[in-house]
Image: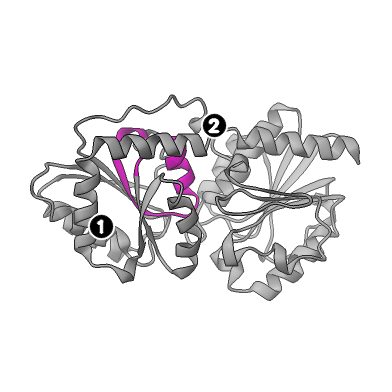
Amino acid sequence: MSLHSICFRVDADEQIGMGHFVRCLSLAKQAQKKGALISFLMGKTNQKVLDILTAQNIQINQLSDVFDLTPKSNLGPIVITDIFNNFTYQRKQKLLHYMVELSQQFRKFIYFDDAGKSALRRDLKNLQSDLVFTPYVGETGGEHIFAGPDYFILDDKYENIPSRQVKESACRILISCGGSDPKEISQKILVGLNNILDYKLEILIICGGGFSIDNKKKIASLSSKSPHNCKILNAPDNLSKHMLWCDLAIGTSGLTKYELAATGTPFLMISIDAIHDEINKPFAAQNTAIDLGISTDFPTFEITNKARSILSNVTQRQAMADAGQALVDGRGCDRVLNLMETLCETQ
């Protein structure tokens, strides 16, 4: 059996975010180049996602609920499941049951797991899976389980990025707090940066598609009163060029920290809760980022002091850039596809 037909089971909208979808799409585009017929099976989606898939000539099948089983007309040899997100994890027992049911519908079952205490493979020991990927720092592999950033999948815009040489003089800052920023951490970062008066900064604030209207208004107000040059960018399709533009990124991070590492972007990292904090600590230990911890556990002036310190230390910024690009080489997609091809050839 070759990679002639692959179904991706993933969800994406303003609340869930786009990270898991982008990962699946990147893998799907590379599989298409190898001649695979691709379809996406989605329980939650939006018009932006549908337009992207249509433009890529990918079949879309929508479910009425995230835990609906696959219609028989959409069954194929291989399914790749990437549905561990904040929405489904709040319904953990239903998610576990759904994963088992889904695995029984396909001949080959592959899934992307989460990290740390959020990882579900420990609760899915009886699940008959063929490949499991947990592409995060600090995770360990096992039989059919492939762990670590070697398997982290990036959009093709992150391919062939040259080794980063940081600038001596640094003043450009990117603020990125995910697709929805539910804790309104973008505001806290901007307040901290507005207290830096000995630098004239250029600040780019990313507002994801799920940002509330109130959050956007407060960000706009802080930007208009800032002593720095501030620009707000709403829901860009890709952050790679903005990462390469900036001297320092500050924000919260799910999957984005791996993109920042691949671009060699120094990162001041903030966790939205204890779960993310647990996952972020092994990443920061690789010297790719400085971890401020959970947003509610430190005062705003910590952002002020840490940002000023990093901007003034070219040696530290270069070390962070080098460590990031050594950690994430952008070849994760090839490694995953090679393992899938080997699986199909040998079974």
Q: Which residue type does callout 2 highlight?
A: Asp
Residue drawn 85% across and 45% down? 77
Residue 285 in view here: yes
- Answer yes or no: do the residues labelled 1 and 2 have beta carbons within 8 Å? no
Describe residue 21's horizontal placement relative to residue 112 as left or right.
Answer: left
Identify residue for label 1.
189
Picture residue at 58% right of the left edge, 62% below the top: 116
Q: Which residues are magenta?
A: 244-266
Please name the residue that numbered disc 2 is placed on. Answer: 156
Indicate whether residue 259 is drawn in magenta.
Answer: yes
How packed mark 2 is, by other alpha carbons closer than 10 Å (few <14, some 14-19, many 20 or more), is: some
Q: Nearer the viewer, residue 227 or 50?
A: 227
The label on residue 122 is none
| Three-letter code for the amino acid on which mark 1 is drawn | Ile
Residue depicted at 64% across the width and 38% down the height: 27
- The picture places residue 87, in percent across and down from the top left corner, at 56, 67
